């Protein structure tokens, strides 16, 4: 007979709900009726240690499986249990854009506060394009860039996030370790507080990344943490002249090209200390879609 796993009581000595609180079965039914509302789950976690433990162990897991069933099934296939214990971090990654701070992780000159994303798409095909050729057997789900337009000298900024399947056994992790890439000296993952490696510093960002993200080449940077969470930033290329209003005079066409070039130049300055710039960039529109994707609604 299979015995259910027993969990130690996590009530603190001063907790006021040690008597008469709802059972786990009742809470499960309540939040199932509420469709695993993430804001209510986060609110419940602030009540006491017992509710926080129950939310991390059960509610966030059900939230992730409900919002992204195919993605969760794939992440846990082949006997992978790396998600267990990190369901809250994964739930936050699905619905929260961490933003960026001035001089922070991405050495950005703009301040973009973190915020909830009420609808997003995670794509395995997009994740594959962010991997170097020798690591294309790894499985990586990446969100469409969260667009923050008109950010001054930075131009149009795109922030994206993702997660690796079975990151401890991935080729990307082996390459990073073999290259002895150091951890970021001060910043940690905003989702699980683990240390971060820079994939730009490891020099394993392929050229296909700028094409799929529709961003300027060498204006892309992303990090991966010890738990396989990925977060990155890119300078999105503006709409080409053919996709905007057709200019009536050649002078307008030339002026628009010069404006686009200045935005790109400013975006490259932020990366100059690491790798330097390039003059190539794709013709943009909106983000690409694929069959290997997962839409998430909050």
Image (tube, rainbow, N blue to C red):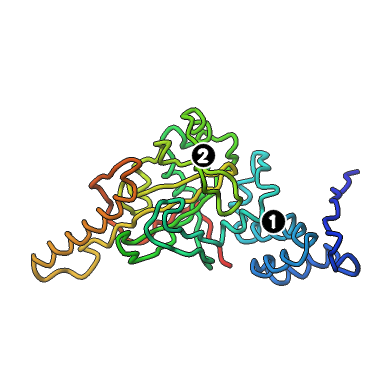
Q: Is residue 45 above or below residue 273?
A: below
The mark nearer the N terminus, 1 or 2, is 1
Which residue occupies the foreground of this view, 50 or 122? 50
Instruction: Left or right? Give the position of 252 relative to 278.
Output: left
Residue 100 vertical placement versus 131 (above, below):
below
Task: Measuring from the top left, give residue 161's x and y in whole percent.
Answer: 49, 53
Report the front residue among 262 and 289: 262
- Res. 32 mark: none
Whether residue 227 sits left or right of residue 81 in the image: it is left
From the viewer's perspective, is residue 205 above or below residue 288? above
Frontmost of labels 1 and 2 is: 2
Q: Quadrant of residue 38?
A: bottom right
Q: Is disc 1 placed on a helix, strand or loop?
A: helix
Left or right of 156? Residue 14 is: right
Name the residue tied to disc 2.
183
Residue 183, how many percent across, how many down? 51, 39
Residue at left offset 36%, top offset 44%: 208
Q: Quadrant of the N terminus?
A: top right
* Image coords of residue 158 (percent x, y): 40, 58
The residue furthest left is 250
Give me the residue at 70% from left, 49% from top: 85
Q: CA distance from mark 1 to mark 2?
A: 29 Å
Disc ID at residue 61: 1
> The C terminus appears in which quarter of the rendering?
bottom right
Q: Secondary structure at mark 2?
A: strand
């Amino acid at each position: 007979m299979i015995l259910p796993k027993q969990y130690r009581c996590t009530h603190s000595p001063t907790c006021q709900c040690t008597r008469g609180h709802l059972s786990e079965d009742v809470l499960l039914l309540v939040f199932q009726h509420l469709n695993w509302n993430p804001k209510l789950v986060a609110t419940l976690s602030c009540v006491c240690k017992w509710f926080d433990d129950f939310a991390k162990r059960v509610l966030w897991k059900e939230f992730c499986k409900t919002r992204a069933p195919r993605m969760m099934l794939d992440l846990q296939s082949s006997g992978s249990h790396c998600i267990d214990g990190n369901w809250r971090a994964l739930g936050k990654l699905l619905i929260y854009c961490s933003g960026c701070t001035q001089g922070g992780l991405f050495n950005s000159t703009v301040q973009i506060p973190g915020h909830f994303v009420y609808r997003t798409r995670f794509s395995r095909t997009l994740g594959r394009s962010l991997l170097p050729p020798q690591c294309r057997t790894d499985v990586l789900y990446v969100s469409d860039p969260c667009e923050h337009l008109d950010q001054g000298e930075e131009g149009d900024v795109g922030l994206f996030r993702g997660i690796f399947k079975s990151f401890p056994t991935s080729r990307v992790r082996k390459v990073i370790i073999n290259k002895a890439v150091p951890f970021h000296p001060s910043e940690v993952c905003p989702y699980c507080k683990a240390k971060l490696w820079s994939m730009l510093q490891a020099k394993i960002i392929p050229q296909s990344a700028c094409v799929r993200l529709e961003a300027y080449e060498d204006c892309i940077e992303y990090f991966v943490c010890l738990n396989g969470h990925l977060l990155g930033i890119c300078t999105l290329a503006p709409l080409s002249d053919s996709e905007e209003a057709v200019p009536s005079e050649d002078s307008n066409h030339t002026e628009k090209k010069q404006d686009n070039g200045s935005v790109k130049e400013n975006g490259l300055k932020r990366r100059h200390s690491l790798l330097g710039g390039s003059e190539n960039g794709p013709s943009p529109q909106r983000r690409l879609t694929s069959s290997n994707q997962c839409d998430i609604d909050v």
